[in-house]
């Protein structure tokens, strides 16, 4: 049974937090800073490059929210074709309390999935994990580690995944020391993704 005094103490603590104006001003500034970084990255990507790797794209979009498992988040989407058959999307997710992640989604019949051996080697070299749950199940993917880790991933496991019912989505964490390093790392990741997709475009 929960002690009523404990509830009162907990509520009192929460109320004090809501009155910490400086804390919320810092949170607001941090949100703006991440949106600014994502804007810099997005604005540096020429639309013809997106066209090069995926014709039916919908460009670039930045979004954010406050309630992803009770925590704020910012998202940068590049390509934005979520068609389950032939789609492609490159997503940067910054999830407060967890960190920054790069996710790439491929529709079941995306041409790049046809050359499984080459795809597998690229995943291993670039340290991607394979998501083993639904596309939007970030709690499962990140918190509960419903993934096939890069160290555990084999060509056979990847082929089995491709033959299953789950969408093909890969993920990797992006470590950074400050805003500048995040900016440059995201640019570098995009350039590598662009080069690989362009090289293997069918």
Image (spheres, rainbow, N blue to C red):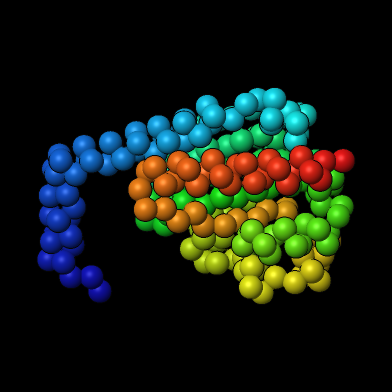
Is 122 positioned to the left or the right of 200 in the image?
left
The N terminus sits in image quarter: bottom left
Is 18 positioned to the left or the right of 159 in the image?
left
Is 21 positioned to the left or the right of 64 in the image?
left
The residue at the point 68 percent across, 64 percent down is 124
The residue at the point 72 percent across, 54 percent down is 168
Is 157 positioned to the left or the right of 46 in the image?
right
Q: Position of residue 175 (x, y in %)?
A: 45, 56
Q: Position of residue 42 (x, y in %)?
A: 53, 31
Residue 45 appearing in the image: yes
Query: What is the count of numbered marks?
Result: 0
Location of residue 76 with respect to 7 vertically, above or below? above
- Residue 19, by quadrant, is top left
Q: Position of residue 113 (x, y in %)?
A: 82, 52
The residue at the point 31 percent across, 40 percent down is 30
Residue 144 or 103: which is nearer the viewer?
Answer: 103
Residue 104 or 70: which is nearer the viewer?
Answer: 104
Location of residue 159 with respect to 40 vertically, above or below? below
The residue at the point 82 percent across, 41 percent down is 201
- Residue 50, by quadrant, is top right
Residue 53 or 129: which is nearer the viewer?
Answer: 53
Residue 66 appearing in the image: no
The C terminus sits in image quarter: top right
């Amino acid at each position: 049974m929960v002690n009523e005094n404990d509830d009162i103490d907990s509520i009192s603590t929460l109320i004090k937090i809501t009155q910490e104006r400086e804390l919320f001003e810092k949170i607001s500034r941090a949100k703006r800073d991440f949106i600014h970084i994502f804007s810099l990255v997005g604005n540096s990507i020429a639309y013809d490059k997106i066209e090069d790797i995926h014709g039916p794209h919908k460009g670039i979009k930045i979004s954010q929210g406050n309630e992803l498992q009770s925590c704020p988040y910012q998202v940068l989407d590049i390509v934005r074709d979520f068609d389950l058959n032939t789609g492609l999307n490159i997503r940067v997710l910054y999830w407060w309390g967890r960190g920054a992640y790069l996710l790439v989604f491929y529709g079941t019949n995306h041409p790049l999935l046809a050359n499984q051996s080459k795809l597998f080697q690229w995943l291993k070299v670039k340290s991607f994990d394979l998501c083993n749950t639904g596309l939007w199940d970030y709690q499962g993917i990140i918190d509960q580690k419903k993934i096939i880790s890069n160290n555990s991933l084999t060509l056979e496991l990847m082929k089995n995944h491709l033959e299953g019912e789950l969408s093909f989505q890969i993920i990797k964490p992006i470590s950074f020391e400050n805003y500048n390093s995040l900016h440059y790392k995201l640019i570098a990741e995009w350039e590598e993704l662009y080069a690989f997709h362009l090289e293997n475009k069918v």
